[in-house]
Image (spheres, grey):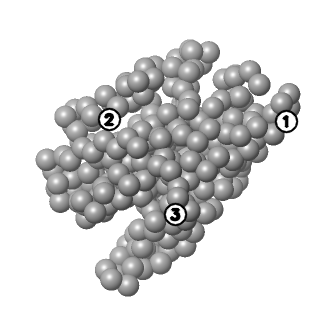
Amino acid sequence: MPTRVPSPQDFTHLSPSLQTSLVFPEIPETTTTVLVLFHGLGDSEVPFTSLAKNLNLPGVLAISVRGVSPLPPALLGLPDSEAARPTRHFHWGDDLTLSPSTGDLDPDPGFSKAERLVLEKLIRETLIERCGWETSDILLFGFGQGGSLALGLSSRIRQAGKVVDITDGDRPTGTAFKGAVSIGGPLPTSMIPTLSARSKSSTPILVCHGRSSESLDEEAVDVLKGEFVDVREVKWKKGDDSMPANKDEMLPIMQFFAERLRGW
């Protein structure tokens, strides 16, 4: 079917299961790429909506997505008064479980709900089936747990699904995104296909992390290289995996976006 620029009305059927915030290019008709953004654990879509506006990527429709489940204020150390207010803190996992080895929240709580809502409902049913886009038109960007989701979806999509085309009937969807960026989030084991003879994902990925990262250590990067054809790694001078704080830290991300937008 012909590709068309999505309108806000195209996304209303996703609510309340999936909340999105849209940032269109200055001239919506110039849209050639869709960027889907996933916030980190305990955050919401609001800061990443602002991030998309600040990025101001040419010809890019940005969709900032809210995590699929609310996070209890107590887990964030917030006062009880927060519990009486509408929650502003969300996560992407199927559950909230503690790692037996560290006592911290399990970094791989399962992402089947997020996969169903984001990959099947938002990407395949809305962007591809309704609006005629291809997976190769779509970039993913995520921070922390949201970065893990971006990598996980890029891993899962190598198993092609199908959408209904009103002119051609069922047709397979693509098996790779235009690119994916993860800041501090590793690939979840639960989102790696179980087929032993699986091929590597052809989605180009960029992972950024601090020099003392525990989530994206050498072993985690080796896992990525075993599952993806094209893996770029940026190790920042700072120790942690926080969001980019200056131009030097942001530069490799912008270079990756520029490359993918040019279709290299």
Task: Write down the quadrant of residue 78 in the picture.
Answer: bottom left
Pointer 2: what residue?
Answer: 253
Q: Quadrant of residue 130?
A: top right
In the rendered structure, the answer to whether residue 65 lies left or right of residue 162 reads left
Q: Are marks 2 and 3 in contact (CB under 8 Å)?
A: no
Q: Quadrant of the C terminus?
A: top left
Q: Amino acid at mark 3?
A: Ser
Residue 179 point in image, percent of width and height: 45, 37
**Sequence-first tag of 2 and 3:** 3
Q: Nearer the viewer, mark 3 or mark 1?
A: 3
Query: Residue 47 has which mark?
Result: none
Q: Which residue is mark 3?
A: 196
State the residue at coordinates (39%, 30%): 257
Instruction: Measuring from the top left, give residue 102's x and y in whole percent.
Output: 31, 80
Q: Is residue 42 above or below residue 18?
A: below
Furthest-front residue in this view: 197
Q: For numbered disc 3, what is the local secondary structure?
A: loop
Q: Amino acid at mark 2?
A: Ile
Eye-nearest disc, 2 or 3: 3
Q: Nearer the viewer, residue 75 or 40?
A: 40
- Under mark 1, the amino acid is Gly
Q: Is residue 135 above or below residue 26?
A: below
Inspect this view and state whether residue 70 appears.
Answer: no
Decide which of 57, 181 is in the foreground and name it. Answer: 181
Q: Dot 1, how many residues are within 10 Å of its Cα: few (below 14), some (14-19), or many (20+)?
A: few
Gap between marks 1 and 2 measured at Cα: 38 Å
Q: CA distance from mark 2 to mark 3?
A: 32 Å
Q: Is 136 or 41 nearer to us in this picture?
A: 136
Could you tell me how far apart the alpha carbons at marks 3 and 1 are, in whole angstroms? 31 Å
User: Residue 138: which quarter of the image?
Assistant: top right
> Circle 1 sits on which residue?
169
Q: Residues within 10 Å of mark 3 (few under 14, many from 20)?
A: few
